[in-house]
Image: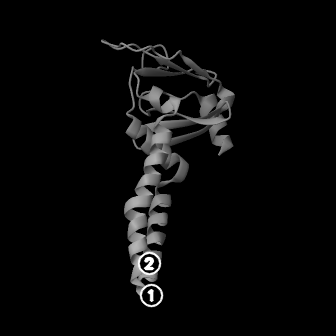
Amino acid sequence: MTEDRNITEPFRIAASKYLRISFRQRHGMAAGTAVAGIFVVAAIAASMTDIRWGIVALMVAMVVAPAIMGIYIMSEMMKPEVVNSSLQHTVEINDDGSVNIVYTEEEGCSYRLPSPEYIAAESLVQLNYCGEYAVITAMTNGRRRLIIFKKDELKLPECLTLRLSELK
């Protein structure tokens, strides 16, 4: 955090980390474990009656499920916020609770940077912590948007923390 402004140092988040945090925020860690557990129990029960059901369960586990997960992951990774999070950027939280995201140029950068983003305080709906990161959820243009930054780098304004805690 800089001395006079509530702004992070330039950073980037890998797409894989963004997806992992996004999945935890959206589904929780228990969701995947519960679905896998139910599938295993159903597969074992079905294969006790007829071995062909066990073969079908193995086909689903080894072919169908990875294909579906691959399609889901690729569709998530192509969203603009995931792509932009892998670019070097800074996050600034203003005194009124609004957020500015500014993309900064790196040495040897040969691509065009996206324009800075402004997210109004009214769009921010939730604040969570996921490991070493703070995650602010915003609703912009009818879409859910995650703003992720290291929780030690920014001091959240009191008006923002009070408003987000009231929404929970």
- The residue located at (65%, 24%) in the rendering is 120
Label 2 and label 1: CA atoms lie apart by 8 Å
Assign a secondary structure to mark 2. helix
Residue drawn where x is 67% and y is 30% of the image: 141
According to the picture, the residue beneath numbered tag 1 turns out to be: 49
User: Total label count?
Assistant: 2
Residue 36: image location, x then y, percent: 44, 65
- Decide which of 156, 69 is in the foreground and name it: 69
Q: Are marks 2 and 1 in contact (CB under 8 Å)?
A: yes
Quadrant in the picture for residue 145: top right
The residue positioned farthest toward the left in the image shown: 108
Horizontal placement of 125 versus 37: left or right?
Answer: right
The answer to which of 6 and 103 lies nearer the viewer is: 103
Disc 2 marks a residue whose amino acid type is: Trp
The amino acid type, in three-letter code, at marker 1 is: Thr
Q: Residue 112, image x and y in percent?
A: 44, 13
In the image, is residue 83 above or below residue 37?
above
Judging depth in this view, the residue of 76 and 166 nearest the camera is 76
Q: Which residue is located at x 68 percent, y 42 percent?
A: 167
Q: Which mark is residue 53?
A: 2
Q: Eyeballing the image, is 48 above or below 135?
A: below
> Is 139 situated above or below 62?
above
Residue 61 in sight from this viewpoint: yes
| Percent position of residue 108, x then y | 30, 12
- Farthest residue, direction bottom: 49
Mark 2: give few (<14), some (14-19) or many (20+) Cα within 10 Å: some
Disc 1: CA contacts within 10 A as few (<14), some (14-19) or many (>=20) = few
Q: Position of residue 139 (x, y in %)?
A: 64, 34
- Residue ID at (38%, 74%): 55
In the image, which disc is placed on residue 131?
Answer: none
Q: Is residue 8 visible?
A: no
